[in-house]
Image (spheres, rainbow, N blue to C red):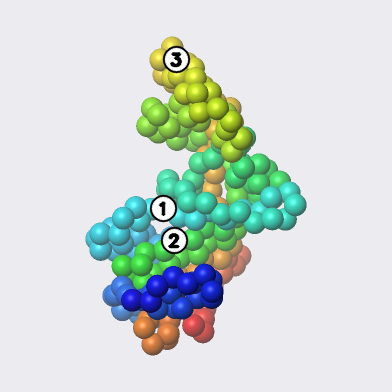
Amino acid sequence: MTTWSPVDGGRSYLRALPVLQGSGPPVDTETVPADPVALFASWLQDAVTAGVPEPHAMTLSTVDARGLPRARMLILKAVDEQGWHFAVSAVSQKGRDLAACPAAALTFYWPALVRQVRITGAVIEDGTAASAEDFRARPIGSRAMALTLRQSQPLVDPAELDAEIDKAQRKLDEDPGLVPDEWKSCAVAPGEVEFWQGSPDRRHWRLSYQRIENGWDRTRLWP
């Protein structure tokens, strides 16, 4: 096995690592659903069946007010005709990014199946009721952390973190239904959805769904 060398920045080491080691079922372009949501649901269930850890984890990519991109992992909450749903705190970096530029990209990757799905589009808020329902369904520790309203701020003293969480926990003990105004359930309303399945010979299968006035237009893409 090649060892990491700082001389080439690990280039030889990285090139020696295996890729495209998974195996996905064949895809028939002629019979895929007309709606990308249906195909996504099928692929997600395939990932669950294949034992992919946290198959509903996704990369959320945003752009801040200066035009700088950021990406982080989140958990998908739902997929429907409105789009791909997730939740954020308005005071977090991603919340501030979306306030400045309400558009995002989502990326799912399931290496066991050599599959990925990319979604891009405008980000819309689901409304107060949906945001409250999402927040109350979260684990108690997650709700307490969100109630600190300090996400993405510099942390100087770890003891302050413990104190703020304890304070938030007391608030939840007093009012279990408490929901911060800053909590937002959102959705990426897709303008484009691309499905990709890799192949060792690099003849990757790619299919792009483009939003049109009355539905979706499907286009097979070069690898």
**Does 215 sit left or right of 20 as displayed?**
right
| Mark 2, secondary structure of its residue | strand
Q: Amino acid at mark 1?
A: Ala
- Image quarter where the N terminus lies is bottom left
Q: Are marks 1 and 2 in contact (CB under 8 Å)?
A: yes
The residue that disc 1 covers is 57
Residue picked out by circle 3:
170
Characterize the local packing of mark 2: few (<14), some (14-19) or many (20 or more) Cα atoms within 10 angstroms: many
Q: Is residue 120 above or below residue 94?
A: below
Rendered residue at 50%/64% (across/down): 118
Task: Identify the residue at image location x=38%, y=76%.
Answer: 2
Q: Secondary structure at mark 1?
A: strand
**Cβ atoms under marks 1 and 3 closer than 8 Å:** no
Q: Find residue 111 and report its image quarter.
A: bottom left
Number of the front mark, 3 or 2: 3
C-alpha distance separating marks 1 and 2: 7 Å
Q: Quadrant of residue 67?
A: bottom right
Q: Secondary structure at mark 3?
A: helix
Q: Which residue is mark 2?
A: 108
State the image coordinates of residue 78 (x, y, percent, origin top left). Answer: 42, 48
- Residue lying farthest top? 174
Identity, as a three-letter code, of the amino acid under mark 3: Arg
> Is residue 213 something that shows in the picture?
yes
